[in-house]
Image: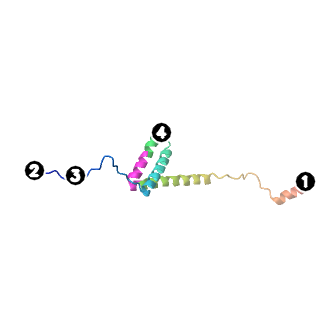
Amino acid sequence: MKKTPAPTAAKLPSTATRVRKSSLFRKAARLGATVVAARVAADTGKKGVIGLIAGAGAKRLIMRYPVGAMVLTGAYLAGKLYEAKREADRKMATKLLTDASAKPILIDEARAARKKAG
């Protein structure tokens, strides 16, 4: 008894190519991943290869794992908020102090002194 080969799926002609349409959500995800990756690369403090690797890793994590995207983006935003609060606290602490060494001159006293002088 001869064995017959198993049926195979119909092959596409070599000229036909599959076109994957990108959804609007995927385009938005790519844009967001690129923005966050660029910010991560810039905030590493080092230019060149290290920033490039950090940005590429962040983009890959965001595009591949939805939970990773939420964690990474949330951590990035939390860090930015923390830095902004720390900067605001620093500015409040370094307000200009008034010079209390001189006695203030009241307006009535200044007018009386001017009348006497003039």
Residue 95 in the image: x percent, y percent?
65, 53
Under mark 3, the amino acid is Thr
Please identify, in this view, whether the residue under mark 1 or under mark 3 is nearer the observer.
3
Of mark 3 and mark 2, the one earlier in the sequence is 2
Which label number is shown at residue 2? 2
Q: Quadrant of residue 69?
A: bottom left
- Residue 43 drawn at (x, y percent): 50, 46
Quick one: SS at disc 3?
loop
Mark 1 and mark 3 lie on one chain; the one further toward the N terminus is 3
Residue indicated by mark 4 = 48
State the residue at coordinates (50%, 45%). Answer: 42
Q: Nearer the viewer, mark 4 or mark 2?
A: 2
**What's the distance in space between the residues labelled 4 and 2, CA to CA?**
65 Å
Name the residue carrying label 1: 117
Q: CA distance from mark 4 to mark 1?
A: 72 Å
Q: Please say if the residues under marks 3 and 2 sit with CB atoms less than 8 Å apart.
A: no
Local crowd size for mark 2, using a 10 Å CA cut-off: few (<14), some (14–19), many (≥20): few
The secondary element bearing badge 4 is classed as loop
Examine the residues drawn in magenta and state their main secondary structure. helix
Residue 102 position, x and y percent, is 76, 52
Quadrant, the C terminus: bottom right
Q: Nearer the viewer, mark 4 or mark 1?
A: 4
Whether residues under marks 4 and 3 lie with C-beta atoms below 8 angstroms apart, the answer is no
Whether residue 105 sits left or right of residue 94 in the image: it is right
Residue 14 horizontal side relative to residue 47, left or right:
left
Q: Which residue is disc 3 drawn over? A: 8
- Callouts 2 and 1 close, C-beta under 8 Å: no
- SS at badge 1: helix
Q: Mark 4 vs mark 2: which is more N-terminal?
A: 2
Tell me how far mark 3 sits from mark 2, CA to CA. Answer: 18 Å
Q: Residue furthest bottom?
A: 108
